[in-house]
Image: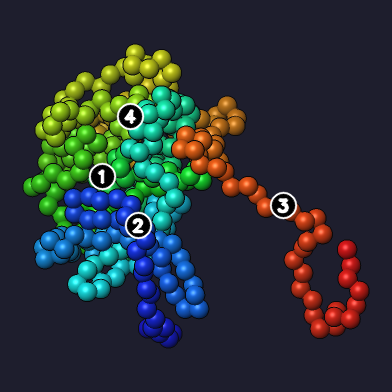
Amino acid sequence: MALFTIQNDFRYEITRKIFEGGMGIVYEAEQHGSRDFVKRVAIKVIRPNFGSQKMFMDNFVGEAKLVADLIHTNIVQTYHLGEANGLCFIAMELIRGVNLEQFTHQLADRKRSLPKELAVFITSRVARGLAYAHSKADKDGKPLGLVHRDVSFKNIMIAFEGDVKLTDFGIAKAKGFLTDQEGEVVAGKPDYMSPEQADFQITDKRSDIFSTGIVLAHLLLGRNIFKGATAEESRNRIMQQPIPDFHSLDPRIDDKLNDILHHCLARDLGHRYATADQLLTELEYYIYHGGYGPTNETLGKFIRELFGQEPVKPARVDAHSQTIILDETARSQPAKN
């Protein structure tokens, strides 16, 4: 029973297109509220031809409901599910930055390589977001059994401030939220799938760990070793291609990092990391066990320089400026330094 109800309407003004996919389009927009309140957001809109497909609409709405309570620094936050003129949309956190695909293309264009420690740091933030999502429960405390199923370069964002954000839970599975045809259809990006995902098997959270291992290997090597000329070839490589000695592919990859990669990419589920928390611990120990390691600020400085973004200069601090609260009796008293 609600204490009381507040009824109000938002107005969204679309300012530019951010990304266009096969089933939807993401725009930058201004959310307008009362008294000239304005907030910049991202708006995900489904294409009209998908609006008449019940299963797609159910999953679009299910995605919004699922991620509404996923509030974590490494997950893009959802603010609002709306419908106007027959058009369904999701209002989300606007990330001022790029996805990993754009990031690595810029590295290639600038003939730059990503420092090993930053590759591990980015992956650790993805693992951190997954650990939170995988442990999420419903309002009654029952585990959702959430599996993202689409951890890939396009769905990992880096803000110019250095935050790493996992996005797009559009094909995630979780109890009671999305229609799931797992075992009958294959969903996801073929070159980032887990072997069980590519082979029409039922997945659990360990599937996301395999995909995260592909992300780490791709960041380190500058290429996805599983990507084939076709989707079918990529799926076959995921299921059958021998997992290499990564040190032989890049001498920067030492024995410990090579071991982490092999534990992520183990096809035998018993040999793969059981949880994203385990992977997170391994990655963070790797970059921090010797002392100081990369931070959001380190990554932010790197990506701003890579894309020619000027860092925000801190405001000049006035030593005599301070926040004070005065009661009525203090009005006539002289100010104290």
Q: Residues within 10 Å of mark 4 (few under 14, many from 20)?
A: some
Q: Which residue is mark 2?
A: 16
State if disc 1 and disc 4 touch (CB < 8 Å): no
Q: Mark 2 falls on what kind of element? A: strand
CB under 8 Å between callouts 2 and 3? no
**Of marks 1 and 3, the one in the foreground:** 3
Q: CA distance from mark 2 to mark 4?
A: 30 Å
Q: Which residue is mark 1?
A: 150
The residue at the far bottom in this view is 4
Point out the tag, 4 or 1, that comes first from the N-terminus: 1
Dot 4 amino acid type = His
Q: CA distance from mark 2 to mark 3?
A: 33 Å
Can you tell which quarter of the image residue 140 is in? bottom left
Along the horizontal axis of the image, is 77 left or right of 142? right
| Mark 3 neighbour class, 10 Å CA radius: few under 14, some 14 to 19, many 20 or more | few
Residue drawn where x is 33% and y is 61% of the image: 43
Which residue is painted at 21% across and 60% down in the image? 46
**How far across and how far down the image is residue 6, in percent?**
42, 83
At mark 4, the secondary structure is helix
Residue designated by label 3: 316
Name the one closer to the observer, 68 or 93: 93
Mark 1 vs 3, N-terminal side: 1
The answer to which of marks 2 and 1 sits earlier in the sequence is 2
63 relative to 91 in the view: left or right: left
- In the image, which disc is placed on residue 218? 4
Question: Could you give the CA–CA distance between mark 2 and mark 1, rounded to whole angstroms?
Answer: 26 Å
Amino acid at pointer 3 = Arg
Expressed as whole percent of the image width and height from the top left, the position of residue 41 reads 40, 61
Query: In the rendered view of the protein, which quadrant contains the C terminus?
Result: bottom right
